[in-house]
């Protein structure tokens, strides 16, 4: 992650609508990719389709060139945790999982959301990892309300995943989102209740649990981007952008668009 400014920018209602537009475009892009994720497809093919779709919708792929990242999406297969680089050498096969993280930039605001897909038929053990990771994201979102603190979100995610014996990644965290992809505050997937920055209406953050089937530790690949679990076991990643409100967070991205596609494929 690049060095980020410590200021937490509160957004107006109009700015939140622009963020929603950028984030819904990410969800629509992921839904397009959902149609294509199957054995035999390369992650480079997915990247190409994503870039075309984002540009056809009047936006720019926010990841491309960010800190030198070479592609429009991150594709992290099996034991890759996040920041996997799409490649024509990575061919998806039956039983794999692939986390696709996607970013858009439109009307001055960033969209950033991720979903982990099954390739063909995946084991029950891995399906449970995906289900638990996604559920932990929603547990975190339940805590993302005015008056709570950042630590309440992390506590909820951590507690939900560790109860199943999973490893909660520490090195990478969620973040504020707005005109920049990474704004303050950091949003860890672990923490103590009542700790960290106070949540206020107008804050917009990405909550993105990265959860490992086994140990929580990572290692970094020599490509300078890809991270893998240290024990070689699978890792899952789901990310939503949300706006903090009183009582209930406003989710700016939408998994429903993706899951409609997935249910029609089956
Ligand atoms: Mg992301
Ligand atoms: Mg993010």
Image (cartoon, helix red, strand yellow):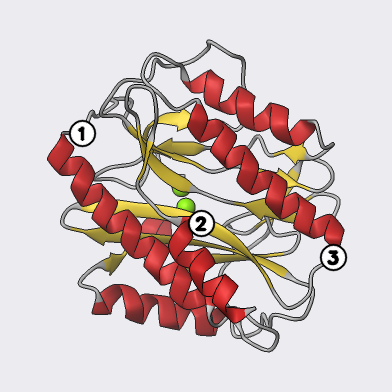
Secondary element at tag 1? loop
Q: Are discs 1 and 3 less than 8 Å apart at CB?
A: no
- Residue at the disc numbered 1: 11
- Whether the residue under disc 1 has CB within 8 Å of ligand 2: no
Residue 195, x across and y down, in percent:
53, 12
Task: Decide: is 52 above or below 85.
Answer: below
Cα separation between marks 1 and 3: 42 Å
Secondary element at tag 2? strand
Would you say 219 lies left or right of 247 here? Answer: right
Task: Choose between 68 and 46: the one closer to the eye.
Answer: 46
The image shows a total of numbered marks equal to 3
Residue 151, x across and y down, in percent:
54, 19
- Residue at the disc numbered 3: 123
Label 1 environment density (alpha carbons within 10 Å; few <14, some 14–19, many ≥20): some
Q: Residue furthest bottom?
A: 40
Q: Residue at x 38, y 68 (%)?
A: 28
- Residue at the disc numbered 2: 114
Task: Choose between 257 and 107: the one closer to the eye.
Answer: 257
Q: Residue at x 27, y 42 (%)?
A: 178
Q: Quadrant of the C terminus?
A: bottom right
């Amino acid at each position: 992650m690049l060095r980020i400014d410590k200021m937490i920018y509160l957004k107006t209602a109009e700015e939140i609508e622009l963020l929603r537009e950028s984030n819904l475009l990410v969800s629509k892009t992921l839904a397009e990719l959902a149609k294509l994720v199957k054995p035999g497809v390369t992650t480079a093919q997915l990247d190409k389709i994503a870039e075309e779709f984002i540009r056809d919708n009047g936006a720019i792929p926010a990841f491309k060139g960010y800190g030198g990242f070479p592609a429009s999406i991150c594709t992290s297969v099996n034991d890759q945790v996040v920041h996997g680089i799409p490649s024509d050498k990575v061919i998806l096969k039956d039983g794999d999982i692939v986390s696709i993280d996607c970013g858009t930039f439109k009307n001055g605001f960033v969209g950033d959301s991720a979903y982990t897909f099954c390739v063909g038929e995946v084991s029950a053990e891995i399906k449970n990892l995906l289900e638990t990771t996604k559920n932990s994201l929603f547990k975190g979102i339940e805590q993302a309300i005015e008056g709570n603190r950042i630590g309440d979100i992390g506590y909820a995610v951590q507690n939900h995943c560790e109860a199943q014996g999973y490893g909660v990644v520490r090195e990478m965290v969620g973040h504020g989102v707005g005109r920049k992809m990474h704004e303050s505050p950091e949003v860890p997937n672990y923490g103590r209740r009542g700790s960290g920055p106070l949540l206020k209406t107008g804050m917009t953050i990405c909550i993105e649990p990265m959860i490992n089937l086994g140990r929580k530790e990572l290692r970094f690949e020599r490509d300078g981007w890809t991270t893998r679990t240290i024990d070689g076991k699978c890792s899952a990643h789901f990310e939503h952008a949300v706006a903090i409100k009183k009582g209930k967070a406003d989710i700016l991205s939408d998994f429903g668009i993706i899951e409609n596609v997935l249910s029609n494929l089956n």
